[in-house]
Amino acid sequence: MAQGSGEGFGRRSLLQGAAAGSAALALPALSCAAPAQARSGRPSADWGVQVGDVTTSSGLVWVRSDRPARMVVQTAATESFRGARSWRGPVIGPDTDFTGLTSLHGLPSGEQIHYRVLLADPDDPRRTGEPVSGTFRTAPTGRRADLRFHWSGDLAGQGWGINPDRGGYRIYEDMRRRNPDFFLCSGDNIYADSPIPERVTLPDGRVWRNVTTEEKSKVAETLAEFRGAFRYNLLDDNLRRFNAQVPTITQWDDHEVHNNWYPGQLLDDNRYTEKDTDVLSARSLRAFSEYFPIRTLRPDRGGRVYRVVHHGPLLDVFVLDMRRYRNANSPGRQTDDPQGILGAEQLRWLKRELSRSQAVWKVIASDMPLGLVVPDGKTDFEAVAQGDPGAPLGRELQVAELLRHIKHDRITGTVWLTTDVHYTSAQHYAPERAAFKDFEPFWEFVSGPLNAGGFQALKLDGTFGPAQPFIKAPDRANTSPAESPQYFGEVDIDGGSGELTVRLRQEGGQVLFSKVLQPGRVGQ
């Protein structure tokens, strides 16, 4: 059962392999050495393991080696690994920064899967390193099983990195202890444009200390620097422990490349020698695909971030990409905007897949909010809303088309989850309050950051009639995680009634706001 605050059966001791030999902040010296300079011996997987895009019968396992190695995964029903099944993975090497993926399929539904990854010498399969273990639960095929997942985003932003004095990214331990079935990361997994300094003096005189690496001493431009930025977060043993227990559904946003970037943009940022965001985003996307287990990013699956992850009859997660297909940021006053923020092809895909979905709940994982006005400079806007409360204009036209489709196709159970703005809030959209009225009411919930600066609340745009029953945000820009709480959201779906409960939580687990939604409705 996913419900409850304790650890689930079989998960209690899973991390012995993942944590062995690598204390939280003792890794920088190891990680900064190039694999070719690694000590002699057997392959090692000090970066832990991850599983992504889990369904009723499948999962995708990730690992990183310190040298060329053959990846082998073993799965079993128990921690003893009696009767284990073996999965022969790829030989991993420098072309993928020594990362590898192995697809598991034909797994039993609704079961706890124990797995361990072995790294073997490609020339001598008898020479293997210490196995690294993890576990995950496959999605159920029946409706009776409860479901819990968390979401958030924004990690190591604004220079607030792994602080040993605070115990690192401790919010991941808060989430792990609540035993979710999976974690939805809504973007900004790294801040490629934010170097990590050794120390920062806070307004009250305290000093924030960071673990640092060479790659994070400057903005990321080269493929090696992007890889190093993704690798930085795995220095934190809270995150590695979390990854070994909780599978992920991961999307990206702007800071994987540069703040507020869009295709075709040329940066006006003197920290960069490479100013073409198309070049930078291609390098980032390659590193992103190497460091997260995402099925659709594989070359044989289209190389894209947007996808739907089917998590049994209770839930489908529609993962959007509001970054690669958008038009340029602008004042957003166009009366015709077929490209918008999703691109025409992604919008067609989303409408089609929502109509096909048979799941009770359809979570739309949006890397940017709909009704919050996110500025980009003095005249342009970064998200959907542009501050004009009248009829849809600019990128709002695509959202209006989608909302109209949901209403007229009688698509039930849609809920929007997002991050991006570095505070937590709940927005309810209703046609009776809106300038555009051809849609059914729906909720949008915001949670984050995980470990980044907090920022003040943004204004609401009235086009889709939002009301905001809850908000918690700091009163000044870039408050450190030592000064302002970090946030994550929690979703519970009751297998019996089908009710969906959203809880907005802060670091430490305190519930700030909750809302219960009923199944089978077009609007809420």
Image: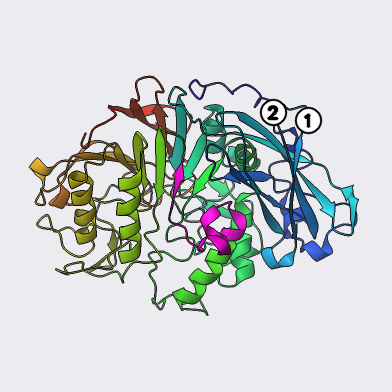
- Residue type of the residue flagged with mark 1: Gly
Circle 2 — which element? loop
Q: Residues within 10 Å of mark 1 (few under 14, many from 20)?
A: few
Image coordinates for residue 146, horizontal then vertical, percent: 45, 24
As rendered, which of 41 and 215 lies closer to the eye?
Answer: 41
Callout 2: 10 Å neighbours few (<14), some, many (20+)? some
Q: CA distance from mark 2 to mark 1?
A: 8 Å
Residue flagged by tag 2: what amino acid is it? Ala
Magenta highlight on residue 61: no
Under circle 1, the secondary element is loop
Look at the picture and state if 504 lies above or below 371: above
Q: Which residue is mark 1?
A: 83
Kindly identify which residue carries mark 2.
Answer: 77
Q: Are marks 2 and 1 in contact (CB under 8 Å)?
A: yes
Q: Give the percent coordinates (x, y) of residue 289.
A: 57, 59
Q: Position of residue 23 (x, y in %)?
A: 73, 41
The answer to whether residue 119 is left or right of residue 433 is right
Q: How is the image coloured?
A: rainbow
Residue 472 seen = no
Q: Magenta residues, as a range?
A: 288-310
**Closest to the observer: 340 or 369?**
340
Q: Looking at the rendering, in which quadrant would you find the C terminus?
A: top left
